[in-house]
Structure formats: structure tokens, C-alpha cells
């Protein structure tokens, strides 16, 4: 099925084991996108009544079939049981992490267990390395990303936590590409509870497209519409999400 890498990997941090999970086309169509697929896989791999900060909790990082190939579809979704609400929580973030996760050869990650010591994951073209994060623990997110990038190929995109996540603050974010945030639900504390400081992703794998010429024409059309709109063309780029507050309030949302 085009738009997918057809690979999701489950990583057990307690053992270091890695398991490839394949999904049939029916599942991918029924639970399309990073959010739907993330919730589906979370519920399959996690018990109902677990403590969010226990090693039994899992956290998923998921992309969708348009991630990395279509304008405005570069986001990725993180799903887990929230330490803030004690319910299933999904948080979205932009930047390059979602696209580079796909280019690294994976549609998504399922992370289970708990490492006995601080670690980070380095994922490149289908290869997953578990590396020590002893020198990163306690550092803020910008310093963490800078240090990891010094040792990764092609300036990897990095999602990581800072001291808030390490100390299990219930509203801690996961940051990627310096200033992009999975900020809802306190999912940064889930990584902290697993001693997982960061995930670095990079790769060169092509994403299969059914009709490249039609996609290029659609790209051009969508980009023109984005540029012409006063909110998406300029305001969002300069001011970020806060520019939407008045629009959202006016619609009672």
C-alpha cells in the first residue's frame, strides 16, 4: 500500500529486544493516520488499568500515509496513558521528526519496558541502536539535541525530554527540532519513567508514491492556496499557533 513503509517496530527497553510488526491493509485503512493507528496499537499492547509511570505502560510514535510526501502532513503523533489525566492521551508535533522517521524506514515506534539506566535511541535506515545517555541526563532539550547531533548522520531529527520529563513532571513535554512540542498529556514524563532521554531519526529510504506526477501537481495547487491565505501564508509562520487563539475563540472551540 503506497504512502507506508510497511514497518512498525516494538522496542522493549527492559530487554533490548526489537520486534517488527506488520499491519494488513484493512487495519491501515480503518485506523488511518498517526492518531488512529497510535491509539489502536496502544490499546493492543497495554493493559487497561496500568500506572502511567510504570514499566508496563507503552508509548507510541506514529506517522500517517501522507507524512513526508504532502504539504501540511509532516506531523507525528505520540500516544500513551497520560500521567496528567490517567486516560489515553495523544499529542501532535510538527517539524521534521515525522518525515525523518519515515525516511529511516518506519511508520512508527512502540516503546515498552524501562531501561535500567539513561539511554537514547539512534535510528538510521532501518537500524536501531540503543546508546548510553549518561552524559545527557540533566541537560535541557537544546543542549541534548546539539550533543546528539554531533554523533549522528546527516543532522538527525531528535525528539527528547529535559529535566521536567526526567523528574516525571505530569505536564512535561517531548520536544523535537529544538522548538517543536508534543505538549499535551505530560507524555515527556513517560519517557522519563522509561529512562529514555531521546530518539534520533535519519534516513534515505524512499517513500513509495502511487502517482508521482499527480502528486506534484497537487503539491503546487495546495502550496498556492497556503501562500494566499493570510493565516497560513504569513501569520502562522511568524507568530506560531498563538495566532489561532482569536479564530478558535470566535468559533466557540
Image (cartoon, rainbow, N blue to C red):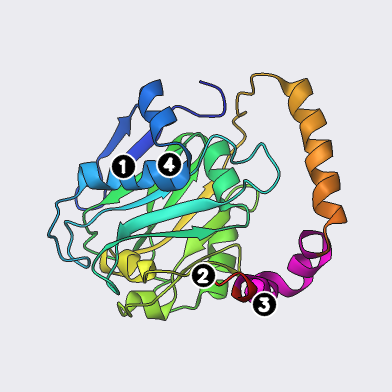
- In terms of sequence position, does the residue under pointer 2 or pointer 4 come before the other? 4
- In terms of sequence position, does the residue under pointer 2 or pointer 3 come before the other? 2
**Spot occupied by residue 136 in the image (x, y as percentages of width and height):** 43, 71
> For mark 3, does the 10 Å Cα neighbourhood hold few (<14), some (14 to 19), or many (20 or more) residues?
few
Q: Which residues are magenta?
A: 231-248
Residue highlighted by disc 3: 246
- In terms of sequence position, does the residue under pointer 2 or pointer 1 come before the other? 1
Q: Nearer the viewer, residue 97 or 48?
A: 48
Residue highlighted by disc 4: 108
- In terms of sequence position, does the residue under pointer 1 or pointer 3 come before the other? 1
Q: Quadrant of residue 174?
A: bottom left
Q: Is residue 26 visible?
A: yes
- Answer left or right for 133 relative to 46: right
Q: Quadrant of residue 251?
A: bottom right
> For mark 2, does the 10 Å Cα neighbourhood hold few (<14), some (14 to 19), or many (20 or more) residues?
many
Q: Which disc number belongs to residue 178?
A: none
**Spot occupied by residue 131 in the image (x, y as percentages of width and height):** 38, 55
Mark 2–mark 3 distance (CA, rounded to whole Å): 35 Å
Q: Residue at x 40, y 44 (%)?
A: 36
Q: Quadrant of residue 248?
A: bottom right
Residue highlighted by disc 1: 40
Contact check, label 1 and label 3, Cβ < 8 Å: no
Vertical order, 18 against 111 (above or below): above
Mark 2–mark 1 distance (CA, rounded to whole Å): 31 Å
Residue highlighted by disc 2: 144
- In terms of sequence position, does the residue under pointer 3 or pointer 4 come before the other? 4
Mark 2–mark 4 distance (CA, rounded to whole Å): 22 Å
Amino acid at each position: 500500500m503506497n504512502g507506508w513503509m510497511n514497518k512498525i517496530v516494538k522496542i522493549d527497553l527492559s530487554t533490548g529486544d526489537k520486534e517488527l510488526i506488520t499491519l494488513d491493509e484493512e487495519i491501515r485503512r480503518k485506523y488511518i493516520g498517526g492518531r488512529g493507528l497510535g491509539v489502536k496499537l496502544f490499546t493492543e499492547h497495554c493493559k487497561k488499568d496500568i500506572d502511567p509511570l510504570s514499566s508496563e505502560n507503552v508509548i507510541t510514535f506514529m506517522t500517517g500515509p501522507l507524512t513526508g510526501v504532502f504539504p501540511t502532513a509532516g506531523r507525528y503523533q505520540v500516544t500513551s496513558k497520560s500521567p496528567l489525566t490517567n486516560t489515553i492521551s495523544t499529542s501532535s508535533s510538527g517539524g521534521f521528526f515525522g518525515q525523518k522517521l519515515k525516511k529511516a524506514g518506519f511508520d512508527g515506534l512502540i516503546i515498552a519496558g524501562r531501561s535500567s539506566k539513561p539511554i537514547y535511541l539512534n535510528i538510521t535506515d532501518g537500524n536501531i541502536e540503543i546508546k548510553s545517555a549518561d552524559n545527557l541526563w540533566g541537560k535541557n532539550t537544546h543542549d541534548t539535541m546539539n550533543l546528539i547531533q554531533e554523533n549522528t548522520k546527516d543532522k538527525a531529527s531528535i525528539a527528547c525530554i529535559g529535566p521536567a520529563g526526567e523528574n516525571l513532571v505530569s505536564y512535561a513535554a517531548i520536544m523535537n527540532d529544538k522548538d517543536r512540542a508534543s505538549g499535551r498529556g505530560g507524555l515527556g514524563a513517560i519517557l522519563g519513567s522509561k529512562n529514555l532521554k531521546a530518539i534520533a531519526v535519519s534516513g534515505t529510504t524512499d517513500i513509495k508514491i502511487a502517482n508521482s506526477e499527480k502528486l506534484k501537481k497537487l503539491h503546487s495547487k495546495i502550496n498556492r492556496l497556503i501562500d494566499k491565505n493570510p493565516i497560513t501564508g504569513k501569520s502562522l509562520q511568524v507568530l506560531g499557533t498563538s495566532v489561532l487563539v482569536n479564530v478558535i475563540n470566535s468559533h466557540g472551540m
